[in-house]
Amino acid sequence: MHMITLLKSGQLKDLEGRNKSLLRLVELSVTLNSTLDLDELLQRITATATELLECEAASILLYDEHNPRLYFAASTGSDPAQLAEIPVPIDSSLAGTIFRTSQPIILNNAEQDPRHYSQVSEHIKFKIKSLLGVPMPIKDRTMGVLEAVNKREGEFDGGDVAILSVIAAHAAIAINNARLLRATQQALEKVKVTNQIKSNFLSLASHELRTPLSVIMGYASFLQDGASDETTDHVNHVMGAAAQMRSILDQMNNLTLLQADEMEMRQTKVPIQSVLNYALDEIKYAAARRDMRLVLDYQDEPIYVNVDPEKTALAFVNLLNNAIRFSAAETEITVGAARQEKQVLVWVQDHGIGIPTDKLQKVFEEFYQIEPPHTRHYGGLGIGLTIAKGLIESQGGRIWAESAGEGKGSTFSVTLRTV
């Protein structure tokens, strides 16, 4: 009877130990899935492994893809920087064997085993008596090795292998996710820096070029007043080119203001027809030079919107200039507007080169050109549509492009709330 009681007591104690281990593994899983800081993850993994296996220390060795070897990423009770100085060879170390074979290894008498890499012990002044190592699998590869060192009581056994393998599997996923996040953050930071450099250049260029351009236009205007018949055409060409340059600088400045969220909007109640008529006046000479016909498809009955008239007209000027640039001479461009419940739909339709289906969103990206840069026929910086999109969306509107494909024309549509 006494023996049965002892057996039951031992079984109960073993069951309680297993439940405790399972609970800690669940807690570790939750923690790892909610933590994306790599350094914090490494410390939590080694601390939990040390606790559950009742050993003196645990270490994580990760594979260095750029310099094929293993290195210590973390270890309980040791300086990470000091450990990182120790290169662990893949072909002549215990961790390397585990990494290569993807199989766990138990050494309960590590000092006598030739596979034990003694340089680690010597470097950190830590005597390794027993060791358990398991691979850290991620998808179809092994990313590193998780080791537990110096069992406090007894020896490492199969139960310890099972527990450490579960920890290693969870750890591999968490570390991989943290690495992906860190790589993404670094990439975003590089993009942010690049975008800032680009914005600074646009702002500086648009500012610095205005002074010499003003001088050119001033002298050209002076020459225009007293020009003879022979020089009038030359002066007009200079003035036309200067005006085109000023338009480009204005576009660059507008893009810079939109990117910095510094575009000032003075919204007022205005008929959308008035905005469109203003935009059409701005581009009618460009259309006339190419014998293009402007077709108006909207009624005189006012459809009121609450927008900045000047900035909204600029958005439509950019859409119209885009239609003129990418359409053949002697074709027509349709500008329409219609009320749709609590909003107005405005569209600019051309019969030009069209847009491939997979490029309908990309045409709004800054500096994007459908044409290859070295074989361009249509000109432009590729920011007009970007500016139009920014001006419309900053006022609560929406803009999108539609096209049946290359050579089949395009339609740019805008919706704005009515008042």
Image (spheres, grey):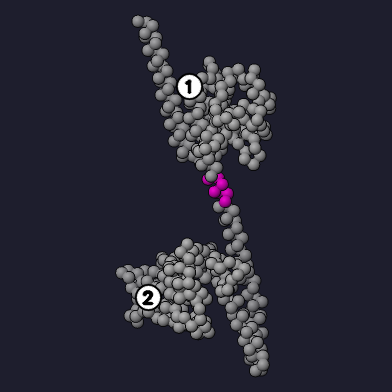
Residue 387 vs 38, above or below: the answer is: below
State the residue in front, 330 or 46: 330
x 53%, y 33%: residue: 136
Q: Which residue is mark 1?
A: 159
Q: Report the span colored magenta.
A: 181-187
How many numbered marks are there? 2
Read off the residue under disc 2. 337
Residue shown at 36% from the left, 71% from the top: 344
Q: Nearer the viewer, residue 257 or 62?
A: 62
Residue under the image location 46 percent in, 38 percent down: 33
Q: Amino acid at mark 2?
A: Ala
Q: Secondary structure at mark 2?
A: strand
Frontmost residue, 301 versus 331: 331
- Which quadrant would residue 400 be assigned to in this image? bottom left
**Amino acid tagged 1:** Gly
Q: Is residue 75 above or below residue 281?
A: above
Q: Quadrant of the C terminus?
A: bottom left
Prevailing secondary structure class for the magenta stretch in the rendered image: helix
Q: Label 1 near label 2: C-beta < 8 Å? A: no
Q: Is residue 364 visible?
A: no
Q: Position of residue 228 (x, y in %)?
A: 66, 94
Q: Position of residue 315 (x, y in %)?
A: 47, 72
Q: Residue furthest left?
A: 341
Q: Is residue 26 above or below residue 108?
A: below
Residue under the point 60% across and 58% down: 194
